[in-house]
Image: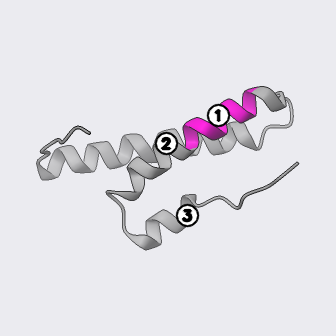
Amino acid sequence: MLGFLFNERECRELDYVLRKELDEMLFDLNDKVIEQDLKGAIEARYKVIFRMYARLASPKEISRYARNRVYH
């Protein structure tokens, strides 16, 4: 495990970067053209990024990016 010390500005920047990445992945996951195997890889990455974001964000902000588990 690694630890980082961020100042307030760096925390806001990290928050912004993670939110934008989550938005992009949500967009890709909802795209009908993208193949299922690629969506599986995006979903795995989404889980990692979401856990990182959950450490910084409030519960209200986290709920915006929470995904329901969908089994195909």
Tell me the kind of residue under disc 1. Ile
Looking at the picture, tell me which residue is in the foreground, 8 or 42. Answer: 42
The residue tagged 3 is 64
Any mark on residue 17, and which? none
Disc on the earlier residue, 3 or 1 = 1
Can you tell which quarter of the image residue 40 is in?
Answer: top right
User: Is residue 41 on the magenta stretch?
Assistant: yes
Residue 6, above or below 63: above
Can you tell which quarter of the image residue 38 is in?
Answer: top right
Say if mark 2 contacts mark 3, CB within 8 Å: no
- Pick the quarter of the image with the N terminus: top left
Looking at the picture, tell me which residue is in the foreground, 70 or 19. Answer: 70
Q: Residue at x 34, y 57 (%)?
A: 55
> For the magenta stretch, what is the residue range?
38-46
Any mark on residue 48, and which? 2
Q: Residues within 10 Å of mark 2 (few under 14, many from 20)?
A: few
Q: CA distance from mark 2 to mark 1?
A: 10 Å
Q: Is residue 42 left or right of residue 15?
A: right
Disc on the earlier residue, 2 or 1 = 1
Q: Residue at x 79, y 55 (%)?
A: 70
Residue 44, above or below 16: above
Q: CA distance from mark 2 to mark 3?
A: 16 Å
Q: CA distance from mark 3 to mark 1?
A: 18 Å
Disc on the earlier residue, 2 or 3 = 2
Q: Position of residue 48 (x, y in %)?
A: 49, 42
| Number of the front mark, 3 or 1 | 1
The residue tagged 1 is 42
Q: Residues within 10 Å of mark 3 (few under 14, many from 20)?
A: few
Of all residues shown, which one is farthest toward the bottom?
Answer: 60
| Number of the front mark, 2 or 3 | 2
Q: Residue at x 38, y 40 (%)?
A: 17
